[in-house]
Image: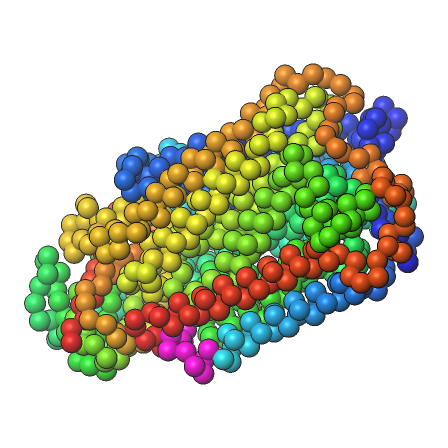
Amino acid sequence: MTAATAMRRCEITGLSVDRSAERLIMLNAVTAVVYLAIGGILALLIALTRWQTVHLLSPQRFYEFVSTHGMVMLIFWILFFEVAGLIFASTVLLSARMVIPWLSWVAYGMMFVGSVVATVLMLSGKATVMFTAYPPLRAETHWYYAAVLVFAVGAILAVVHFFANIVAARLRGDVGSLPLFTFALMGAAIIALWSLVSGALALFPVWLWALGVLPEVDPGIYRLLFWGLGHGAQQVNLAAMVGVWYGLASLTTGARPLNEGLSRIAIVLYVLFINMGAMHHLLVDPGLGTWVKNVNASYFMYAAVMGSLIHAFSIPASMELALRERGFRRGLFEWLRRAPWGEPGFAALVVSMVLFGLLGGISGVIIGGPQVNMISHNTLLIPAHFHMTVVAGTTTAFMGISYYLVPLIFQRQLLFRRLAQWQPYVFGLGMLILGLGLGLAGHWGVPRRHWDITFSTAPALGMNLQELRPEIAAFLAMVGIGGVIAVVGGAMFVLVAVATVFVGQRTPRPAVGRIIPEAFSPYPAIAGGAGEPATTTHRGFEVPGTLVISVAFLILFIFLYGFSWFELSRVPWKIG
Amino acid sequence: MASRVSALAKPRGVWWEGLGRDERLWVWLVVIWGIAMFVMIAFVWPLVGQEQNRLSSYRVDPAAFVAEAEAFIARYQVGQLDGIPVVAPPPGGDVYLDARAFAWQPVIQLQRGQTYRFLISSRDVQHGFSLVMPPHSINVQVLPGYVTVLTLTPEKAGEFPLICNEYCGLGHHLMIGRIVVTE
């Protein structure tokens, strides 16, 4: 097989696309969206159960569905999509070939079989152990653990193939410096490798224990290893999402990162420090000392937070610069007013950055401190935090980039463009209401993964939490209403994606919004405007608008951080 | 000055350059903020706060813990509530709290303003100690085979629900205990 027959040249971007890579991207992406749809239906039912007034599901169904929803969304949807992204970033974006196609097929096969078996077992009530599967709580069947392990090994193979592709492209001399998008995914892949290995190390003994080979598993050590995966996998999402943010900024505004080196250093900070986030789940665990918790959860962790804050500045700054270069130079914010708000990718980028930053990031730093964690551990504040990061942040960003990559990879005309334009806003609004509802209820002490906080069926000592403070009912209503709106937003995405893939008109030149061919080119033409070179147009600050936004964000961060300590000080019991 | 390229394209040539004025300002702000947060957690709050995360713990055989907890209940029991023993430990003393699917045992009666050392463990699966006092809660993890040691001083009288916030099985939502604080 010669390279000529195996590659096609994209008429829009000019990139050479390896056909076998393309097929695997399609397969992984379609599988991801199927899992997103399944998880979304479960999300709706769960939200309508936590809304205590509606209280839809029976307890057993509720716990089955929470288990399945967690696994399907946090692991299956996200990882299948990320594998598609890894293949894309290591082949298509580099105009490079996929070096070992069979390895990706094996990886896909293992991930597919493992995920289907695990999902079926969870849905049928054979493994109602939640995403975390903490021993000594045991799934009814050891096949559940085996299925998750098979999935994990498949995912490890997919990640290894990503590295193989890049090393091969490097050796062939096809690529010098990686595009920033690929560099971010490289960061994600490094974190993924270590997370998946940690997860496999946690689950393998549990599988042996379920088989009866091992007499017992230490629950404390399991938690330490498991959270290497549980939180680590979310850091994979973070690094991948940041890559997608940069990509969307370039696609929708022609942005070019302000300082390539700084952005890359920020990604390296993730790789070096963010796995310490795993400690966040162990802050009120027995078995670990105070300084292990302090140093891992705050000192090292903040090096990764700095990385995020650098991206939070660099991405809007690069867009501001690009838009200013197009002539939107008046005042601080003309560039922002004239930004392409009707472009689905830009809308998704803004929704994702705002919700991730304001709610997801800040809440994570706050509840990740060992002291404040005592008033938030395992309350609904925890799902509030990770729904703002993984769903409002990562998922919205992934949806946004799909509006460009799906037409380009599948070579189909995007259908329902109007729907796509509104989708990020609808989804974001739903997630905002859901997140605030979860967060407030959690702060008021409502636990996560709990069927009935009225304790109406408790055999003894029942107390209705909603009667202690009636506003809790309103917070849980927000969870229900926000959940419904978010699911509608998610369904809009699934509809656009599925319709485009299966009935969109075939064309080698799909219309992809404002996508600029030069977004894929290392030789940028001076775009639009007066065409003055960017370096001579400013005397003061280069990106004053972004500085104002960033400093305002930092002030809000400091305020909320201070407020969290104030709240801790108001706890009517002395601790420690 | 090095040329800037799209995030989706391979940069050519030398792209490494110094930070501009804007980036330098922001990076400094961010570094200072990161250090400030660490200092708050590691040094400031431990000096000024009334709520400290100073959990300690030790390993235990679950059966031995259950025996100690039962001896504790027998010694200080003052009554019964819904069939669960109510225990009034001496001020400043140890309080054994025994978690199992799906109950906390015993009901604990404390005096306001007195300090107690809670020894919490589970006899079966993982549980979550969550003392709810909306708009707040106090939460620590409870593992079988480990005792979580937590020092608490109630400063408000009342009846506080003690719920489980770690999923522990299909009856998770039935698991509730109580701590009663008297004047």
Q: How many marks?
A: 0
Q: Is residue A118 magenta?
A: no
Note whether A454 is above or below A313 in the view shown: above
Q: Residue at x 47, y 75 (%)?
A: A290
Q: Position of residue A257 (x, y in %)?
A: 78, 51
Give the residue drawn at x 19%, y 64%. B159
In the image shown, does B59 or A89 lie closer to the viewer? A89
Q: Position of residue A227 (x, y in %)?
A: 51, 56
Residue A82 in picture, x, y percent from top left: 64, 41
Range of the magenta residues?
B45-59
Left or right of A107 in this view: A48 = left
- Residue at 72% x, 44% y is A249
- In the image, B36 versus A180, the foreground residue is B36
Task: Identify the image's colour scheme: rainbow, by chain, secondary structure or one colour.
Answer: rainbow
Residue located at (60% from left, 63% from top):
A554
In front of the other: A249 or A109: A249
Is residue B67 visible in the rendered image? The answer is no
Which quadrant: the N terminus of chain A? Answer: top right
* Image quarter (top left, top right, bottom left or bottom right) of the C terminus of chain A: bottom left
In which quarter of the view is residue B15 placed? bottom right
Q: Of A169 and A529, which appears nearest the observer?
A: A529
Q: Is residue A533 above or below residue A414?
A: below
For residue B111, above or below residue A389? below
Q: Is B46 a magenta residue? A: yes
Return the x and y of residue A130 as percentages of the image width and height. Answer: 41, 46
Would residue B151 be visible to someone looking at this image?
Answer: yes
* Furthest residue toward front: A330
| Name of the residue lying farthest toward the left | B79
